Image: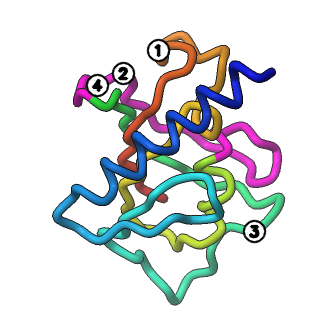
């Protein structure tokens, strides 16, 4: 447990430094990721709410810029079918929104990782809500 706390603190420092070094403005959203909004989407349509189904296109990179995953899928908000960093922020987006986020491993894919993302991997995610 203590090791994970130390790894999380180190990840937070790394992600903060990267977000601050970017040309674009990034903001810390819900303590889960540093986010830059490229396009706010169609604000005449509602943002996803708990239980709504939405289509998400995402490209996931490691912090060296290597593409780890390129996928599109349909997800139910509130079922945590997406990483926490996305799940917590998606409710602020409207269809058509495009964001880039830098997320520490513990709000992204965790200590287990996925088939494409290694465990404890800090990531950059380009996301579009469709």
* Residue 116 tag number: 1
Q: Position of residue 22 (x, y in %)?
A: 22, 58
Sequence-earlier tag: 3 or 1: 3
Sequence-earlier tag: 4 or 1: 4
Residue farthest along the left direction in this orientation: 23
Q: Position of residue 9 (x, y in %)?
A: 58, 38
Quarter assignment of residue 20: bottom left
Could you tell me how far apart the alpha carbons at marks 3 and 1 are, in whole angstroms? Answer: 28 Å
* Residue 81 tag number: none
Is residue 123 positioned above or below 17 on the image? above
* Residue 49 tag number: 3
Residues shaded magenta: 64-84
Mark 2, residue position:
68
Seen at 49% across and 86% down, the residue is 43
Could you tell me how far apart the alpha carbons at marks 4 and 2 are, in whole angstroms? Answer: 4 Å
Is residue 104 positioned above or below 121 on the image? below
Q: Are marks 1 and 2 in contact (CB under 8 Å)?
A: yes
Quarter assignment of residue 24: bottom left
Mark 4, residue position:
67
Which of labels 3 and 2 is toward the front? 2
Could you tell me how far apart the alpha carbons at marks 3 and 2 are, in whole angstroms? Answer: 28 Å
Q: Secondary structure at mark 1?
A: loop
Q: Is residue 22 left or right of residue 12?
A: left
Q: Residues within 10 Å of mark 2 (few under 14, many from 20)?
A: some
Front-most of residues 66 and 104 = 104
Name the image quarter holding the N terminus: top right
Q: Are marks 4 and 2 in contact (CB under 8 Å)?
A: yes
Which of labels 3 and 1 is toward the front? 1
């Amino acid at each position: 447990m203590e090791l994970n706390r130390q790894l999380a603190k180190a990840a937070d420092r790394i992600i903060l430094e990267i977000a601050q070094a970017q040309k674009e403005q990034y903001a810390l959203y819900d303590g889960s990721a540093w986010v830059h909004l490229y396009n706010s989407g169609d604000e005449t349509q509602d943002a996803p709410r708990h239980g709504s189904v939405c289509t998400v296109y995402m490209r996931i990179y490691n912090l060296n810029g290597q593409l780890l995953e390129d996928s599109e899928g349909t997800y139910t908000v509130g079922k945590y079918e997406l990483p926490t960093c996305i799940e917590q922020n998606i409710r602020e987006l409207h269809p058509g929104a495009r964001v880039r986020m830098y997320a520490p491993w513990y709000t992204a894919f965790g200590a287990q990782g996925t088939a494409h993302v290694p465990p404890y991997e800090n990531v950059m995610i380009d996301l579009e809500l469709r």
